[in-house]
Amino acid sequence: MSMFKRMLASVGIGAAQVDLMLHEDVVHAGDTISGVVRIQGGRVDQQVDDVYAYVMTRYVKEQNDSKIEQEATVAKFPLAGKFTVKAEQVYEFPVSFQLPSNTPVSMGRTPVWIQTGLDIKEAMDPKDRDHLQVRPHPHAEAVLEAVEQLGFRLREVSCDYAPHFGRLTGLPFVQEFEFVPTTQFRGQLDELEIIFSPSESGVEMLLQIDRKARGLAGLFAEAFDSDESFVRLRLDRSQLAAGTGYIADQLADTIRRYAH
């Protein structure tokens, strides 16, 4: 009977189960989140080599003229080391870890979840999935408020495959915030896209400034994408602390330099 139970446990029937109970499910990128991991022993004793939590998301990748969704690991956190889960026993222990500052924001069609699992040799690894509502890192949030003050409307947020920007994000994709001007830049720009890379010391941004086509030369520029400028802009903590008005002025000055 014991051998039969072990065989069933190896394919997940009557095996140990894991559940991460988060203290909060609405967080900011960069926050420390905490909770309790609950492990319910199965019908037989099982050796657990690792208890882990992955921060996961999805991004879009173009392949063979079609768009496919890929899962991506933003970060992995070890929660516990090797131990034996006794049959029918319940184990609970507190955990906490810091979300990376570049965790994508839960906007548009971008999901973010914590995947908790047990690493059990020669068996199907039990897993648990908990979705998070992730808000922007406070430094990115300050910039977004300034962008809104300048009269830009957020049109779309998406995660797209972009390995060439890996140095900026450390990931195979970027999250793009796409805005359209509604007031002062309405006659100058078609759109503004921003990629954020926040940290404790400030925020680095890649701005894509898409100028509005003017005349025949402008139409040619638009046809060959030469009407777009990619600009790096960094604001440190002291600049961000100066307030929304100051940040808006820095953004407006940068946009004006490349909007002509």
Image: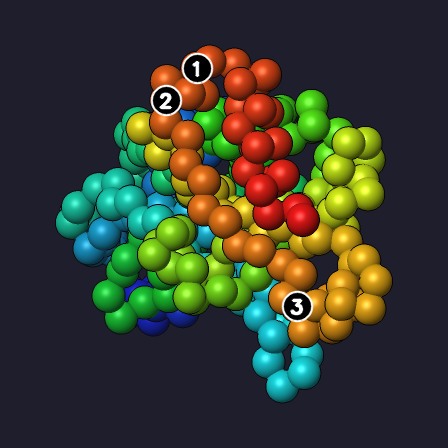
> Disc 3 and disc 1: Cα gap in Å?
36 Å
Whether the residues at callouts 3 and 2 have beta carbons within 8 Å, the answer is no
Picture disc at residue 241:
1
For mark 3, does the 10 Å Cα neighbourhood hold few (<14), some (14 to 19), or many (20 or more) residues?
Answer: few
Q: Nearer the viewer, residue 195 or 58?
A: 195
Is 238 left or right of 26, judged from the image as shown?
left
Q: Which residue is label 2 attached to?
A: 237
Q: Nearer the viewer, residue 256 or 63?
A: 256
Give the mark, 3 or 1, whose residue is nearer the N terminus.
3
> Where does the image place residue 47, in percent across and percent down from the top left?
20, 55
Whether the residues at callouts 1 and 2 have beta carbons within 8 Å, the answer is yes
Task: In the rendered view, tell whether residue 225 sits above or below residue 31.
Answer: below
> Where does the image place residue 113, in percent across and percent down from the top left?
51, 45
Q: Amino acid at mark 3?
A: Asp
Residue 70 visible? The answer is: yes
Q: Residue furthest left?
A: 82
Q: Amino acid at mark 2?
A: Arg
Question: Which-is-in-front pick, marks 3 and 1?
Answer: 3
Q: Secondary structure at mark 1?
A: helix
Q: Residue at x 48, y 25 (%)?
A: 138
Q: Secondary structure at mark 3?
A: loop
Q: Nearer the viewer, residue 142 or 53?
A: 142
Q: Secondary structure at mark 2?
A: helix
